[in-house]
Image (cartoon, helix red, strand yellow):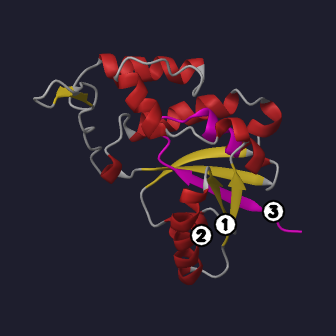
Amino acid sequence: MAERIGIYPGTFDPVTNGHMDVIGRAAGVVDRLVVGVAVNAGKGPLFPLDERVAMVQEEVRALGSGAAARIDVKPFQTLLMHFAKANNAHVIVRGLRAVSDFEYEFQMAAMNRRLDATVDTVFLMASESQQFISSRFVKEIARLGGEIAPFVSKRVAERVRNALARGGAAAKPQDDGIGTTIPAPAARTPL
């Protein structure tokens, strides 16, 4: 029987406990899991691509040798279906947090199926304790001085604090002129 290879794509800016929940569970569904860290400059990531890849690799190692031995972490900047084909994957793994995620994910899965009918999309519901976590919320909480330890590992929390301390447009909140502090848009990662 052929090895079942799955792709779990995302920006992982930063990788959260919710992402790691899906990664750990997805690794139990396929023989080998490739975590694809997307360039996705349109999201204006806080971390450059190489740091996001390193962050996910570090978190995967923390899963232990059993799961970690079957998980690869790779950057990509191509069409997801091209990345899947390049990695001989026939499954795309997507995590769902809430019903609001489903419509977008459903459309994306249908489009991907049209691009390559040999690759299926599998949805994993986030564990109940992780359903509300998003990278966007983690960054916003951190930028505004809140505690992010419940949502990310200690290693990731430290990386977020360091990234924000480095300053720059990606890290510094701006005053909107009426006394409300809003997060600044993150600098775009060059392609």
Identify the magenta region.
1-22
N-terminal label among 2 and 3: 3
Identify whether 115 is placed above or below 109.
below
Residue at horizontal 64 percent and vertical 52 percent from the top:
34
Label 3, on which residue?
3
Q: Nearer the viewer, residue 66 or 148?
A: 148
Seen in the image, is 55 located left or right of residue 42? right
Mark 3 surroundings within 10 Å by alpha-carbon count, few (fewer than 14), some (14 through 19), many (20 or more) = few
Which element is circle 1 on?
loop
Q: Within the magenta stretch, is there residue 18? A: yes
Which element is circle 2 on?
helix
N-terminal label among 3 and 1: 3
Label 1, on which residue?
88
Q: Quadrant of the N terminus?
A: bottom right
Identity of the amino acid at label 2? Answer: Lys
Q: Are marks 2 and 1 in contact (CB under 8 Å)?
A: yes
Question: Going by the picture, which residue comes out furthest to the front?
Answer: 178
